Amino acid sequence: MILTVCLNPCTDVTIEVDSLNIGKLNHVKNKTLSFTGAALNVAIGVARLKGQSYATGFMYNENGSLFEQALDREGVPSIFVWNKGRVRENYKFIDNKSMLTEVNDVGECISENKQAELIDLVAGLSKTSDVMVVSGSLPQGVDSDYYSKLFGVASPQTLKIADTEGAKLLAALKMGLDLVKPNKDELQNTLQQEFKSREDLLKGCYSLLDKGAKRVLLSLGKRGAIITDGTKNYYCKSINVAINSTLGAGDGMLAAAAMRLEQGAPLDEILRAGVAAGTATVTTFGQISFTKDKFDEIYANIKVEEF
């Protein structure tokens, strides 16, 4: 089972417009509502691939039941630490060039008691989990070292995966992680360096290995991804698809990678599955995941090369 820990859920309001005109009237072409959060997206992606996932994290009294219902529809069981207030709302505007403009809300403050409650919950759930994924941002009142506290209570046999950046990622790495999945911007932000060539990017990945990661899966967006364990390095180029939205692409990539890691797959297979799922996700508008049929189609048409 893959346990996913969502610390900062959100309601994503995705709005499609012909073009986003700042300071002027804009007409909505399409609008969708998603009950989401990075780790919840991962749980759904695992379920779409016919894997077993379980979702936990922080949730809020006023509209949290909508998230439970959304997970139920996907066949994902869940249990949350409940807090007062509402889940935050994020607005995502997509224009006719598939450019994404985001306006993110700020969530409710989480008390120390609730933080301790989730740590205890994760400690128990990890005992029956093969993989534990913690991803996404933190709500108000929660320090960056909370990532390390969560991984610190994971059972020794549980594989640990983080998808975050900056101080949160550096804190998590102190616990020793089996996989981290930054994108280029997150890698640069975490290491406070600029990387231009593939060789530079690889050196950045090696820095994360030195800090406590066993594997680094680096997302390069439409260019594909790199994976390394410090001994072998692989690159997988994505294929050209109609991009409807980049929303949730990294989470889809992580879902497939987590499943392959759980299965004991080699590095190149983790990469190939991850790129296939990430690419499949961008073909959907206003959805946070992909279909297995689209995943299978793309997976069959991409190749991995060692470098």
Image (tube, rainbow, N blue to C red):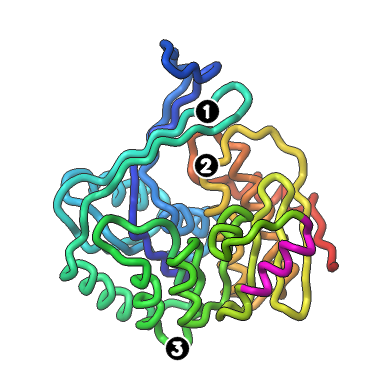
Disc 2: which residue: 247
Tell me the kind of residue under disc 2: Leu
Q: Which residues are magenta?
A: 197-207
91 relative to 134, above or below: above
Mark 3, Cα crowd under 10 Å, few <14 / some 14-19 / many 20+, is: few
Mark 3 residue element:
loop
Of the pair 30 and 290, the residue shown nearer to us: 30
Residue 98 included in the magenta stretch of the image: no
Quadrant of the image containing the C terminus:
bottom right
Quadrant housing residue 111 = bottom left
Label at residue 46? none
Tell me the kind of residue under disc 3: Pro
Quadrant housing residue 270 = bottom right
Of the pair 14 and 3, the residue shown nearer to us: 14
Mark 1 residue element:
strand
Q: Could you tell me what secondary structure mostly forms the magenta stretch? A: helix
Q: Is residue 15 left or right of residue 56?
A: right
Of the pair 188 and 44, the residue shown nearer to us: 188
Quadrant housing residue 146 = bottom left
Mark 2, Cα crowd under 10 Å, few <14 / some 14-19 / many 20+, is: many
Disc 1: which residue: 94
Mark 2 residue element:
loop
Q: Residue at x 21, y 72 (%)?
A: 117
Query: x, y (%) of residue 201?
Result: 71, 62
Disc 3: which residue: 156
Q: CA distance from mark 2 to mark 3?
A: 33 Å
Tell me the kind of residue under disc 1: Ile
Q: CA distance from mark 2 to mark 1?
A: 10 Å
Q: Residue at x 16, y 47 (%)?
A: 85
